[in-house]
Amino acid sequence: MDSETHEIMKFIDKEHMEFLGKGVVGMKDSVNAHFQKEDPTFRIGERRVRRLMRMMNIHASYPSPRLSTLGSATYVYPYLLRKMNIERPNQVWSTDISYIPMGKGFLYLYAIIDVHSRYIVSWGLYSTLEASNAIEVLERAIRRHGAPEILNSDQGSQYTCKEWEEALERYGIKISMDGRGRCKSKETKVANKGTWNIFYKGDLMDSFNGETKPIFRNPQKVIEKYEKIWQERHNSKYEGK
């Protein structure tokens, strides 16, 4: 990855955290305005911004029309949580993937949270976006806590594949998926659209007075520290099952 692309991605990351509803067009304008301050000849198009946002797993967070269908709908499942009363641990888990900007490139944070208690049942850091990573995090959670009744996810490629379907069926877990282009439900927003919500990304940055370099140096250590705080806060509700 060249240095210019890396700087653009870092800016997109910062801009997204401040303006979650900003889509490709708005992000393109912001990137151009920012970098043209130093280089008036700088230009970036929507295609490149869209590619970088997809690489970083960034999506504007607002309801939008469903203008297209999934390329392969074979492994897409309906959303099962609408009007469901989630009243106990291990009834519903929810999973998502987010990114951590590093000095060079990105790491990807896979996490699963118990929706009722908001207890983090499993997480992992990886350098690639593969279904096998999601399955590894899932199996680690099941070994520790048993299998949930339902597991909800988005329609990312890691979850709309044969491997993910087979893994959940193997443990008798019902598959639920958010519809494409819909805003996140109140039941799952603690885990979806930014797994960093689990670890309070904004609070964590504030704790360093806006300085994010500690995350770059040792993200695993920072996440483990913040996970402990979060788990202590929600442990009693989870263990009360």
Image (spheres, rainbow, N blue to C red):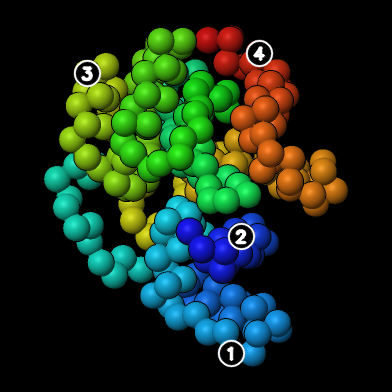
* Secondary structure category for the residue under label 3: helix
The mark found on residue 41 in the picture is 1
- CA separation in Å, label 2 and label 3: 39 Å
When the figure is inspected, residue 39 is found, relative to residue 138, above or below; the finding is below
Q: Amino acid at mark 4?
A: Ser
Residue under label 4, please give it.
236
Relative image position of residue 94 (x, y in whole percent): 44, 33
Relative image position of residue 199 (x, y in whole percent): 64, 35
Which of the 4 quarters of the picture holds residue 129? top left
Which residue appears at 25% of the width and 43% of the height?
160
Whichever of labels 1 and 3 marks the residue nearer the N terminus, that label is 1
- CA separation in Å, label 1 and label 3: 55 Å
- CA separation in Å, label 2 and label 4: 38 Å
Which residue appears at 62% of the width and 30% of the height?
220
Query: Cβ–Cβ below 8 Å for labels 2 and 4?
Result: no
When the figure is inspected, residue 179 is found, relative to residue 63, above or below; the finding is above
